Image: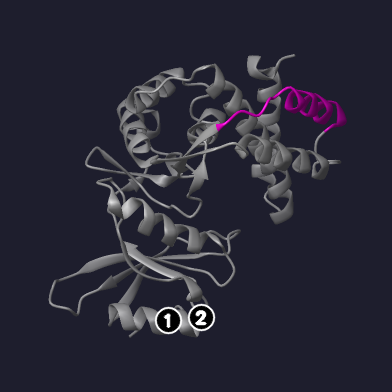
Amino acid sequence: MVMASTANELNARQSALLDEWLGEWMLVEDFSWPLQDTTVLRVRTTGDGTGVVDHTVKASETSHHIGREIAAHRDVIDRLRLSAPRLEFADESAGILVTEYLPGELLLGTSWQSDAGAFEQAGDILVRLQVPGAVSEHYMASVSAQTEDLLGRADGLVDRDSVARLRERLGRIRPLPVRLHFTHGDYQPRNWLVNDGRVAVIDFGRGAQRSWVSDLVRLRSKDFHEHPELEAAFMAGMSRELDEADAELLALETLREAIGTVVWSRGIGDDDFEEHGRIMIRRFLDDENGAP
């Protein structure tokens, strides 16, 4: 039974499933983003004799991220001893899942975002999350092709000189076999919770098999850029260092992310994020990995 109005958030099938799974429930908070097509709710149940229990609900009629998150939980996350929410209910065909609700505050925008200890914890979680998979002979070639396509779509969004320099850098990358890992896909403080000094990770809607360095790209474009001490703490938590092959792969992943950010942001009308993509491009071209 719905105890708060969510008629504009969940469709009839999703609401019926939530009633079936949770019984009597009420809406506590709405975490949905205006520019996203996914509803994210904190809901509360009280009727099964276990006291007050909070849950996180994610639902969408269109987003493929729901299916990815369900698969990530079933295939990887719920099999590991990680600081992450556990999947409770899911129906991919209906586009809805329920996980346990983890207490805490997001690191983003708090004093924890400059805390080296928090970043070390996040690095330790990531290295355990990144379960190794198969070796791919085609991964780098596929990422290169995607990046070339994005460069074509960036015409008019990025100045021609920058596009030419990026395309030249892309052309110098030689595809090599890559060990794939399960990756989070959006690993950064907006998806880290801290509670009593302990870090946890949420939101696995972009989880997929990629290179392990792909989870470093967004951190390097923001938090690590002016705070090398945070990067050092994070990498200490991972107990990993970049070798020459990793560095070249990271350059490729960064290229794709930078151009993709500009193109994707223009498509949804997010001007601030589009500008961040241009900043990533400028930094990449100024970086030694992007220098001729």
Query: In the rendered structure, does residue 196 fall within the stretch colored magenta?
Result: no
Q: Which residue is mark 1?
A: 15
**Residue range of the region highlighted in magenta in the rendering:** 159-177
Q: Is residue 91 above or below residue 206?
A: below
Residue for point 82% across, 41% down: 152
Disc 1, SS:
helix
Disc 2, SS:
loop
Residue for point 30% across, 33% down: 121
- Packing grade of label 1 (10 A; few <14, some 14-19, many >=20) is some
Q: Are marks 1 and 2 in contact (CB under 8 Å)?
A: yes
Q: Which quadrant of the rendered structure holds the N terminus?
A: bottom left
The image quarter in which residue 31 lies = bottom left
Q: Is residue 86 left or right of residue 285?
A: left
Q: Residue 172 or 81: which is nearer the viewer?
A: 172
The image quarter in which residue 176 lies = top right
The x, y position of residue 161, in whole percent, is 85, 26
The x, y position of residue 263, in whole percent, is 73, 46
Q: Is residue 205 left or right of residue 152?
A: left
**Circle 1: residue type:** Ser
Residue for point 69% across, 49% down: 264
Q: Which mark is residue 238?
A: none
Residue 94 shows in this picture: yes
Q: Is residue 182 left or right of residue 45?
A: right
Q: Which mark is residue 11?
A: 2
Q: Majority secondary structure of the magenta segment?
A: helix
